[in-house]
Amino acid sequence: MFNAVRTSDLPRRIALGVPLALLGGAYFGQYVFGLYPCEMCWWQRYALFFALPFALIGWFGRSARWATGLALLGILVGGLIGGFHAGIEYGWWQGFTACTTTATAGGGDALDAILNAPVVRCDTAPWDLFGISLAGWNFLISVPAAIVGLTALGKARG
């Protein structure tokens, strides 16, 4: 029989599930499809990396609502960075000029690796689905999920 998710479990599930899913998708895209991250993509990942240990504390710890709350805030921040990044990709506003490369010497000539590494621009979406970039999907997934999780966490307080 189907058991509905209790409101008290929902924040913990979101806090752990969203970073795992988004980071898993990001690394799958990077290592399977060659979608290397730009600097702003890394910023979004950093927010999810921040969220993960707190999500685990919230998942396994007793009375660790504070940790779940911090994880949900990390997800929210990552999503907002994703929204800002998507706006830069769509040309809605000017972004930062920083770009990154995937240079690694790997036992070879370091200078050659740097000069031949692909440059990953922050203002160009390397891939999209239905016209929405990866940063845009991060925004559309993370922000509503974090708001739902924080709302449910607040309601479960009583």
Image: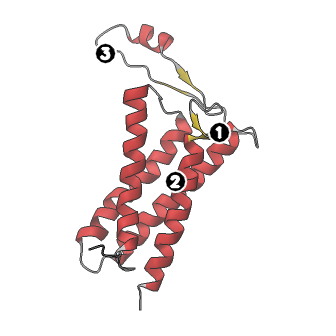
Residue on which disc 3 sits: 106
Any part of residue 35 in sight: yes
Q: How many marks?
A: 3
Residue in front for this viewpoint, 105 or 131: 131
- Distance from Cα at disc 2 to Cα at disc 1: 20 Å
Mark 1, other Cα within 10 Å: few <14 / some 14–19 / many ≥20: few
- Closer to the chain start, of discs 2 and 1, is 2
Asked whether disc 3 touches disc 2, contact meaning CB atoms under 8 Å apart, the reply is no
- Badge 3 marks a residue whose secondary structure is loop
- Badge 2 marks a residue whose secondary structure is helix
Classify 103 as above or below 50. above
Classify 104 as above or below 137. above
Q: Residue at x 75, y 38 (%)?
A: 91
Instruction: Give the number of the mark in front: 3 or 2.
Output: 2
- Distance from Cα at disc 1 to Cα at disc 3: 36 Å
Q: Residue at x 76, y 43 (%)?
A: 92
Q: Position of residue 63 (x, y in %)?
A: 28, 81
Q: Amino acid at mark 2?
A: Gly
Q: Amino acid at mark 3?
A: Gly
**Among the 4 quarters of the image, the one containing residue 24:** top left
Residue on which disc 1 sits: 131
Where, quadrant-wise, is the C terminus in this rendering? bottom left
Asked whether disc 2 touches disc 1, contact meaning CB atoms under 8 Å apart, the reply is no
Q: Position of residue 136 (x, y in %)?
A: 60, 46
**Among the 4 quarters of the image, the one containing residue 104:** top left
Tag of residue 78: 2
- Distance from Cα at disc 3 to Cα at disc 2: 31 Å
20 vs 90, left or right, is left
- Badge 1 marks a residue whose secondary structure is loop
Q: Residue at x 66, y 33 (%)?
A: 123
Where, quadrant-wise, is the N terminus in this rendering? bottom left
